[in-house]
Amino acid sequence: MARARGLLAAPAGGALVVVYSRSGNTAAMAAEIAGRLGAATLAIKAPAYGDDFFGWTRASYDAWNKLTSEIEVPDHDLAPYDWLFLGSPIWWYRPSPPLWSFLEASDLGGKKVVLFNTFNSRFKDAEIAEFRSLVEQKGGQLVDHVYVRRGRAYDQLSRQEMLDEIRARLDERVGAWPVFKNK
Ligand SMILES: Cc1cc2nc3c(=O)[nH]c(=O)nc-3n(C[C@H](O)[C@H](O)[C@H](O)COP(=O)(O)O)c2cc1C
């Protein structure tokens, strides 16, 4: 893939935050992580999963059937980064198809990976184990999984409560991510 000028300025050993978010929640988590790291963010787009009923139907179908999806990603180069933070909503108990598609297309040789998710109620450990396997197949190591549960529609965190929750989860975890110690 071609190199994006902005990302080439990354310090060796730095972190890149990569995120797919259909409705903004996981993007908010990405922004919080990137802000703490002073890291660049790479946003994955998946035009098939628009913000309407048809987009939801397609998203649901692809996720349920564990399909990959057409994604649009700005030109980038993962080589300068030792740490990748990979974020996505949970769809049908697992990270959404766009993140799998990104992973399939990427070489993670020697990289430490932190998976981050937002979701309403639950994910399944077996699905995260499958994600871990693919990270390893691609040469990386999944070192952490950090997530925020927003609650179901009738009892969901407000935007501010979600942000507070994101910050609390990150406060708990940053010590385990040596990338922060270099800052
Ligand atoms: C197709 C689809 C399937 C979903 N499946 C789950 C699920 O299995 N478990 C869950 O807790 N939330 C599920 N959700 C809810 C999302 O994970 C949740 O709203 C998430 O915070 C959305 O993140 P985003 O705003 O970054 O897109 C699903 C949402 C969609 C659109």
Image (cartoon, rainbow, N blue to C red):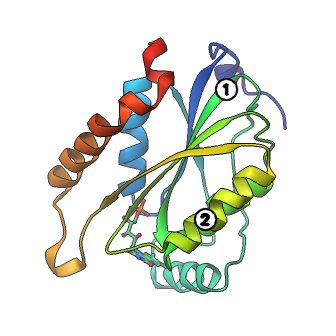
- Mark 2 residue CB less than 8 A from any atom of ligand 1: no
Quick check: which quadrant has ligand 1?
bottom left
Q: Left or right: 93 with respect to 99?
A: left
Amino acid type, residue under disc 2 in the picture: Ala
Q: Left or right: 65 with respect to 43?
A: right
Amino acid type, residue under disc 1 in the picture: Tyr
* Quadrant of residue 2 within the rendered picture: top right
Which residue is label 2 attached to? 129
Q: Residue 81, which numbered label?
A: 1
Identify which residue is drawn at 40% across, 38% down: 31
Distance between the Cα atoms at labels 2 and 1? 23 Å
Compare residues 155 and 130 and report the one nearer the observer.
130
Percent position of residue 39, x then y: 50, 25
Front disc: 2 or 1: 2
For residue 38, say whether it is visible. no
Q: In the figure, 181 relative to 101: above or below?
A: above
Q: Left or right: 162 with respect to 36?
A: left
